Image: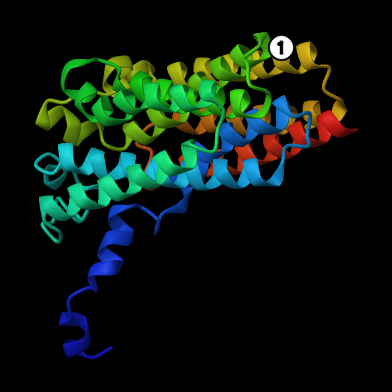
Amino acid sequence: MSIQQELQPEPTWLTIIRLLRWDKPAGRLILMIPALWAVFLASHGTPPPSLVGVIVLGTLATSAAGCVVNDLWDRDIDPQVERTRSRPLAARALTVRTGIAVAFVAMICAGVLALYLNPLSFWLCVAAVPVIVFYPTAKRVFPVPQLVLSLAWGFGVLISWSAAIAHLEPATWLLWGATVLWTLGFDTVYAMSDREDDLKIGINSSAIFFGRYAAEAVGIFFIGTAGLLGSLAVVMQLHWSFWLSLGIGILAWVWHYSRLRQEDLPKPVYGEIFRQNVWIGFILLAGAIAGTLL
């Protein structure tokens, strides 16, 4: 590559792709997974394809909007954190006005998709908006802001389950609880890589709150996730394939816990564990689908 090519500015559309985090699919997929768990379990493995499409597109639009809103709130904080200083708004590669416009378009797309859903699901979508918009402020005032993110993730379960059968039931809340704890687990892992920078800036995270017991906290969250998913399998009478997928997930979580307990863990490992949870989620999704159909 020539020096002239290296000095060429990035095209604006590529910068917007980075703003939406579509260049990093793990974070988008990990929001989509609980929503897919819910729609397939509520529909006993056979949801309408059109509903699945709406949920997939809706989670993409919602997570994109959430990322932009987060970056708007944190545009003066992100430059002080090694992992986030290259984000478009932090690096001033895009203006605040452009960020607001992109967030607005993403929210409009999500809102249009929500019109396809039944009234209960639609109003659950509306209820989720304040949580998504104000989540980034939680790190300034709340000691465990990852819990707020987990509650936002939990809305994906409630919306998708009610979209499939127009009501919620006891099994819904077991899946909701599992999703909240799973999110607390993997997002605490994600926060562990930023602890030094967050302490310097003076913002909160679950990794800082739990301190030297952060690995143990993650382990407890994953144990709770496994327990609630097992209870869900009993209540819904899921077949052996789900138990097999849950067993694989438990083995992976035990491995993650053992790695997190190591001292001086390189920062990239935290990102690896986060991304591996995407694959765990898809394995559980496959088990849930097969467990309702076999």
Tell me the residue at 44%/22% (across/down).
Answer: 123
Tell me the residue at 16%/36% (across/down).
Answer: 73
Horizontal side of 99 relative to 55 (left or right) equals: left
Question: Where does the C terminus fall, quadrant-wise?
Answer: top right
Residue 204 seen in the current view: no
Q: Position of residue 235 (x, y in %)?
A: 77, 11
Horizontal side of 71 relative to 242 (left or right) equals: left
Determine whether 91 is above or below 160 in the image.
below
Residue 205 seen in the current view: yes
* Callout 1 secondary element: helix
Q: Nearer the viewer, residue 30 or 85?
A: 30
Q: Nearer the viewer, residue 115 or 48?
A: 115
Which residue does the numbered mark 1 point to in the structure image? 231
Horizontal side of 168 relative to 215 (left or right) equals: right
Q: Nearer the viewer, residue 52 or 181?
A: 52
Q: Position of residue 102 (x, y in %)?
A: 26, 52
Q: Quadrant of residue 40?
A: top right
Determine whether 261 is above or below 25 in the image.
above
